[in-house]
Every structure is written in structure tokens, then in C-alpha cells.
């Protein structure tokens, strides 16, 4: 019995000493140590060097990962030299490192996390190595000086054409270099989708032409870009939410196969002048054309089974029971809503500055949020009934 107690005591002391073993000094870096695998994740940098050399090791521990937010908002760093051991760069690891101009990633790297280099506004060039197999959403979004993306020809997952990043099979356009001085861009044949944020904030690009292979424009793809004109052949099926939000778009050709226009897809496109719906459109998302202050009419082809428009260019569902959008740039001062309408959609008339008088039939049962908000010159509202069953509190806010 005494011998067993003595052996247990030795084991306990040994384990305690192992647990309390002194970890290597990491200097200006804060780190998480994986004692089992003898690896290190850098979680934060506390120094003030402009050129930062990340070491391969701290003691016997190999540096394999840059953790989430590790260098985020380090405004002064101009250069990062990566070790040959790094396998992963975490989410937002270098976000808003606005003074970095060039990134050369090591061959060991496998994963670039979401928003890893987002809003690195001084970044002009990125070299992606051969073993990278995952690039997260918005990894380079907001890099408005980025003129070129380069990648090893040995990479099996991604490719680059003229500085634009694609999947290896060239079916998805992932990232356009936002600082490119080109004003026109032709999407290559075989591309089937444009990724989220791919052209967001592209400041020089004015015209894009897409082949008939493009079926999807993902969410936020052209948000806040300088794009003025885009054309699609007969192949486009879906435009994602906020896809062109806050862009300078004034002309768009949707083709004849579009099925879905997502929520806020063209919101705040204040230079968009007209919208034409082919027969294939099935879904128009909430606020899809919110604050499109230059749109003078919505035109729907007669054989569309889901939507229609009237002589004033107002957009309705097919049976005219829901009024979806009144063209804000219409110069008429009065409008009488058709007797078939039972619902006026959210922001339908907002902000129609020319309207002074609106007549609402007793068929209308519902007036949704902000339906007439910011119609600052609307002084007369005639409702030919008792009262709609549902009126949002902010329906007439000014």
C-alpha cells in the first residue's frame, strides 16, 4: 500500500511540473500554445514596428496560425514577413492594416479566413501561394488600392486572369482588383457566378459585360461601386440582395431569363432611370428599388405571369392587388390607386417628392411601413372608405 501511494505521488508531481512548465518568451506577440501538437497561434501584436517579422518558432513551438483580429487596426505596419510554417490566417487578422502595400503569402499557407485583409486600403498587390485551398468571404473587400492579384500556377483551387481571382475551373469570379484603373471589364466565358463583394467599391470600373453563362450575381457583388452600365445575355437567373446597392448604375440589361431580384438589390441606385421586367421575373425582394430617385417608370412585358405595370409606370403584382413601387422620378402631382389594390407595400411611394395628392380606394386594407414616408409635398390624402384594417405607424412619416 505504501509503495502504491509513493508511485501515485511521483506521477502527480510529474504532471504538475509539466502543467507548470515555463512557456517560451514571445516578446511583443501574445500567443496560444498547443502543448500537445507543439504549435502556436499568434493572437495579438503589441509592438510598434512598421516592418514585422513573424518568427517560425517560439522555443520548440512552431508558429502555424495567425488568429482572429491579431493585427486588426494596426494602422502603422507597412510590411509583414511571414514564416514558412504558417498554415492559416484567421478572420480579420489584418483587417484595416491600411499602410500595408504588398502581401506575399508563404507556400505553407492553406487557409485565408473571412475578411482577413478587408479594408487594407493601401494594399496594391497580393501574391497567393500554391497550397491555399480556402479563401473566406470578403478576404480582400474594401482593398481599394489593390491593382493586381497574383497566384501560383501550381495552385489547384484558384486561378487568376488579368489580375482577377477565380476558382480553378473559372466558373466563379471571386475578386476583382478594386484599385484597377480599367473602366471596362468583360467577364470571361464559362463564368457562372459572380461572388459576394467581388466588385464592391471598385472605384474606376464603369462598364461590365457578362456572357450568357453567368446565372447568378451574389449579394453585395457591386455594392458602392462606380459601375454605370452592365449587360447580361440571356442566362442570368438571380440577382442577390444588395447586389448593386449604392452603386452609380444608370443602365442595366437583365436579359430574358432573370427569375429573382433580391432584397435591396438596387436600393439607393440614384442614377438608375428605368427598369424593364421580362416575362421570366418571379420574385422582387423587399426594398429592391428603394430610393431609386431617377426611375421614371417600371415596364413589365405583357406575358409576365407575376407582375404588371400601369400607364403611369407603377409596378404591381400580376392581379394588381399589391402596389409594389411607384416610380419616384415621375413628375405627376396626383395619383389615384386602382380599385383592385388591397395592399400598399413598404416604401412603395417613398420619397415621391412631386406628389401632392393621392387617392386611395376603399379596397385597400393594408398600408405597410414607410409606404408614403418622406413624401414631403403630399398634402392631400383621400381615402374612399372608413379606414384600412392595418396602417403602419410610420406609413406617412415625413
Image: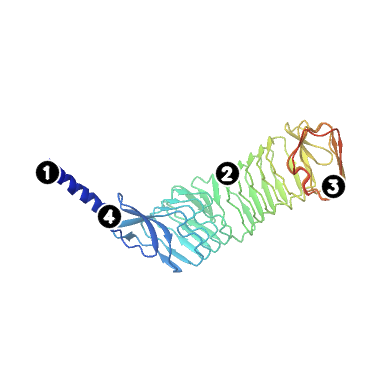
Q: Which mark is residue 20?
A: 4
Q: Nearer the viewer, mark 3 or mark 2?
A: 3
Spot occupied by residue 290 in the image (x, y as percentages of width and height) = 72, 46
Instruction: Give me the C-alpha separation between circle 1 and circle 4.
Output: 26 Å
Nearest to the eye among marks 4 and 3: give it.
4
Q: Earlier in the sequence, mark 1 or mark 4?
A: 1
> Which residue position is annotated with label 2?
193
Which residue bears the numbered disc 3?
Answer: 378
Q: Residue 65, position in %: x, y?
A: 39, 54
Pair 3/1: label in front = 1
* Nearer to me, 362 or 386: 386
Residue assigned mark 1: 3
Answer whether residue 214 is visible to the viewer in this image.
Answer: no
**Label 1 vs label 4, nearer the camera:** 1
Q: Name the N-terminal-most of marks 3 and 1.
A: 1
Give the number of marks.
Answer: 4
Q: What x and y, as percent, mark residue 148?
A: 53, 59
- Are the residues at dot 4 and dot 3 in contact (C-beta closer than 8 Å)? no
Nearest to N terminus: mark 1 or mark 2: 1
Amino acid at each position: 500500500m505504501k509503495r502504491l501511494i509513493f508511485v501515485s505521488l511521483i506521477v502527480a508531481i510529474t504532471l504538475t511540473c509539466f502543467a507548470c512548465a515555463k512557456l517560451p518568451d514571445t516578446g511583443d506577440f501574445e500567443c496560444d500554445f498547443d502543448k500537445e501538437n507543439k504549435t502556436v497561434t499568434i493572437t495579438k501584436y503589441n509592438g510598434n514596428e512598421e516592418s514585422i517579422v513573424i518568427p517560425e518558432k517560439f522555443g520548440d513551438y512552431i508558429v502555424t496560425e495567425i488568429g482572429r483580429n491579431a493585427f486588426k487596426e494596426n494602422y502603422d505596419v507597412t510590411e509583414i514577413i511571414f514564416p514558412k510554417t504558417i498554415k492559416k490566417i484567421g478572420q480579420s487578422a489584418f483587417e484595416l492594416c491600411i499602410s500595408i502595400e504588398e502581401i506575399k503569402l508563404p507556400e505553407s499557407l492553406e487557409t485565408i479566413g473571412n475578411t482577413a485583409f478587408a479594408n487594407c486600403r493601401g494594399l496594391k498587390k497580393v501574391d497567393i501561394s500554391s497550397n491555399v485551398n480556402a479563401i473566406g468571404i470578403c478576404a480582400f473587400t474594401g482593398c481599394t488600392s489593390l491593382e493586381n492579384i497574383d497566384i501560383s500556377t501550381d495552385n489547384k483551387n484558384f486561378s487568376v486572369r488579368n489580375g482577377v481571382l477565380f476558382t480553378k475551373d473559372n466558373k466563379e469570379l471571386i475578386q476583382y482588383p478594386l484599385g484597377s484603373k480599367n473602366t471596362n471589364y468583360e467577364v470571361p466565358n464559362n463564368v457562372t457566378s459572380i461572388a459576394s463583394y467581388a466588385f464592391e467599391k471598385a472605384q474606376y470600373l464603369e462598364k461590365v459585360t457578362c456572357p450568357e453563362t453567368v446565372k447568378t450575381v451574389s449579394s453585395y457583388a457591386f455594392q458602392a461601386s462606380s459601375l454605370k452600365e452592365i449587360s447580361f445575355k440571356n442566362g442570368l437567373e438571380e440577382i442577390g440582395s444588395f447586389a448593386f446597392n449604392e452603386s452609380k448604375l444608370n443602365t442595366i440589361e437583365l436579359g430574358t431569363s432573370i427569375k429573382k431580384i433580391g432584397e435591396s438589390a438596387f436600393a439607393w441606385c440614384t442614377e438608375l432611370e428605368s427598369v424593364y421586367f421580362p416575362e421570366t421575373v418571379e420574385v422582387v425582394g423587399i426594398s429592391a428599388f428603394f430610393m431609386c430617385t431617377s426611375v421614371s417608370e417600371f415596364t413589365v412585358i405583357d406575358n409576365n405571369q407575376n407582375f404588371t405595370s400601369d400607364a403611369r409606370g407603377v409596378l404591381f403584382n400580376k392581379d394588381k392587388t399589391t402596389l409594389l413601387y411607384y416610380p419616384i422620378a415621375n413628375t405627376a402631382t396626383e395619383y389615384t390607386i386602382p380599385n383592385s389594390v388591397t395592399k400598399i407595400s413598404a416604401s412603395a411611394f417613398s420619397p415621391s417628392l412631386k406628389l401632392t395628392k393621392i387617392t386611395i380606394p376603399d379596397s385597400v386594407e393594408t398600408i405597410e411601413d414607410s409606404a408614403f414616408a418622406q413624401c414631403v409635398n403630399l398634402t392631400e390624402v383621400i381615402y374612399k372608405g372608413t379606414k384600412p384594417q392595418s396602417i403602419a405607424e410610420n406609413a406617412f412619416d415625413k
